[in-house]
Image: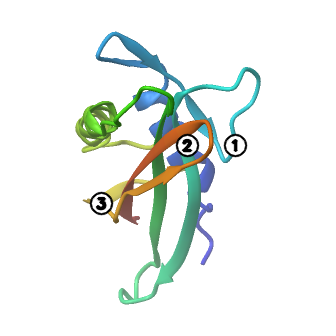
Amino acid sequence: MVKTLPDKYIRKAVFNAVNNIVVDTITIPCYDTRVTGKVEDNYILMSGQSNEVDKSNKCSDKWESQILLEIYTSYDLQGNTGSRLLADNILDKVRELTDTLTLDVASGLEIVTQNQSFPNDLTSTTINQIVYRKFIRIEFLIN
């Protein structure tokens, strides 16, 4: 396999598509693996990537790549009954914006197919907060 690892190009395409989107009048930043700077109540996290070499074609290998995006929303617990609506709306906007990504031409890589899946969401409650986490996994076949 002599093709460039697609990780940084996938992250760049995702970041460019979803960073600072506005959902329900709230600007939603995107981060790579962890939140930096001011602690945010709502954000998108590029939380994990993986790759496998697809050797099914004799002429050239392909990458089977995936990235997991986490949609994070949190609310003060006191007086809040909790609603996943904002998380749902952010996820739907991210789904729309990442439906057809393209990689930087300089990478020499091209997305052949792209699929989205939506793993189970998580809800947690602490002494002070309610946290809703929704996920979207984007899988790529890259030539």
Q: Is residue 126 above or below residue 68?
A: above
User: 11 or 132, which is in the foreground?
Assistant: 132
Q: Is residue 49 above or below residue 79?
A: below
Looking at the image, the residue that sits furthest to the top is 25
* Quadrant of the image containing the C terminus: bottom left
Asked if 121 appears above or below 93 in the picture, the reply is below
Look at 53% across and 25% down and name the residue there: 29
In which quarter of the view is residue 100 placed? Answer: top left
The residue identified by callout 1 is 34
Q: Marks 2/1: CA distance?
A: 7 Å
Label disc, if present, on residue 118 of the rendered structure: 3
Q: CA distance from mark 1 to mark 3?
A: 21 Å
Query: How many residues crowd mark 3 within 10 Å: few (<14), some (14–19), many (20+)?
Result: some
Q: Quadrant of residue 128?
A: top right
Kind of residue at badge 2:
Leu
- State the mark number for residue 83: none
The disc label shown at residue 45, or none: 2
Q: Is residue 105 visible?
A: no
> Which element type, helix, strand or loop, lies under badge 3?
loop
Say which element carries label 1. Answer: loop
